[in-house]
Amino acid sequence: MPTLSDDGTPDVPDHKTPGQTRRTLLRYGIAAGAASVIGGLGGRVLAANLLSAPASVGGAVDAAFPLCLTAADGSAPTGPLRPLKLAWTSSGICTAAAPVAKETGIFAKHGLDVEFVNFGASTEMLLEALATGKAEAGLGMALRWLKPLEQGFDVKITAGVHGGCMRLLGVPSAGVTDIASLKGKTIAIADQAGPAKNFFSIYLAERGIDPFKEVEWRQYPGEALTLAVDKGEAQAIAHWDPLTWLFLKDGKDKYVEIASNLSEKYATRSCCIIGVSGSLIRNERPVAAALTRAVLEGGHEVYRDPKQAAEIFAAYGGKGSTDDIANMLRSHTHNHSPVGVALKEEIAAYAEELKVVQVFKPGTNAQRFAEKVYADVLS
């Protein structure tokens, strides 16, 4: 449970393994000889090596860590850039990799001219944009996407982007300082079907608290979650960054972080994913591959230089000062971007857990679901 430093910022663990630099990962990847070439994207050739090396959190291998070569290392695309619309939102810091990829030239390096479709805080708008062709891909939280995918929504997951960004905050003055003390209490949330409620319902259930009978979930607008606490209507908050990080920073004598989606076994689980329309994968698979590589490279740039990423994200309307945003990004695991078997295992784990909290159908086969909704565009 993180404490607060003297400057009022949450004192979160550094998830970077000592000595784990981009150059080290590149060296390991080259030694492994994991190289692939994609071509034929809109009449031009794109060359990029996918270098896989294990990234770790707390010293444990967490997933395949795909890295794309820098522009100087790979063949530059020729011809006009391929226009592509990407759904994203500046209201959640999960999507920071996208503006970083755009502003640092990573998208262009991969032959893409990416236009953002901002869906605000509404996943329904994101899904509608993909369903109607207003966007060809999107970034968002896995626990928002998986239920529509179970119902047959024509989108495939191509990669995980990072872990972390949801937090469960307790109010010590109301007697809530740990999971056990939540029994009989009210948790303020922004969405009854949102990822924070889903994740922390799972978390409570795994620790012996019935998320349907032993706590109450009460919905408020995201910005008003603290008002619910001030009025005594809630004794805890479950939401995502940047708001929860800022609530904790600004209310260091008022809140305590009980758990996050990096707690315990979830330390090596991604929460934000890349979703690509099924039609794009079927008709222009190299474009889907280029987008996936570019977003992952953008995420790795976030990990390498969170200060630069914060400055870019702030310019797109991200909440908090650049120092705040940089510290938020450091508290996430942007060195965790699983693909392949590792990602399918994470998706299957979520599917099993969502059955426990009655979000998924009891008869859903988690492994088959993971195989169905994942698309390996990088091999």
Image (spheres, rainbow, N blue to C red):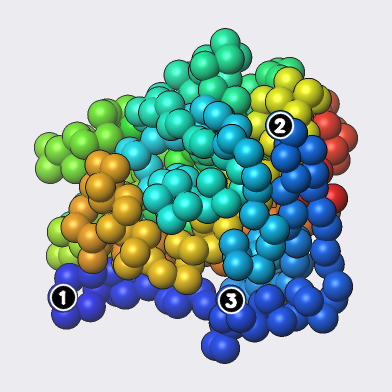
Q: Residues within 10 Å of mark 1 (few under 14, many from 20)?
A: few
Which comes sooner in the sequence, label 2 or label 1?
Answer: 1
Q: In the picture shown, does residue 258 fall above or below 81?
A: below
Q: How many marks?
A: 3
Three-letter residue code for mark 1: Asp
Front-most of residues 317 and 210: 317
Q: Amino acid at mark 2?
A: Gly
Label 3 to label 1, Cα distance in Å? 30 Å
Determine which residue is flagged by label 1. Answer: 7
Which residue appears farthest toward the top when viewing the image? 132
In the rendering, at what x and y percent does residue 180 appear?
44, 57
- Tell me which numbered mark, 3 or 2, is placed earlier along the sequence: 3
Residue 309 seen from this side = yes
Give the secondary structure at mark 1. Answer: loop
Crowdedness of circle 2 by 10 Å Cα count: few (<14), some, many (20+)?
A: some
Q: Which mark is residue 42?
A: 2
Instruction: Give the spatial CA distance, label 2 vs label 1.
Output: 51 Å
Q: Which residue is mark 3?
A: 22
**Figure check: 81 above or below 11:** above
Q: Residue extending furthest bottom?
A: 19
Identify the image quadrant of the N terminus.
bottom left
- Residue ranking furthest to the left: 231
Q: Position of residue 262 (x, y in %)?
A: 52, 61
Q: Residue at x 84, y 76 (%)?
A: 32
Q: Nearer the viewer, residue 213 or 274?
A: 274
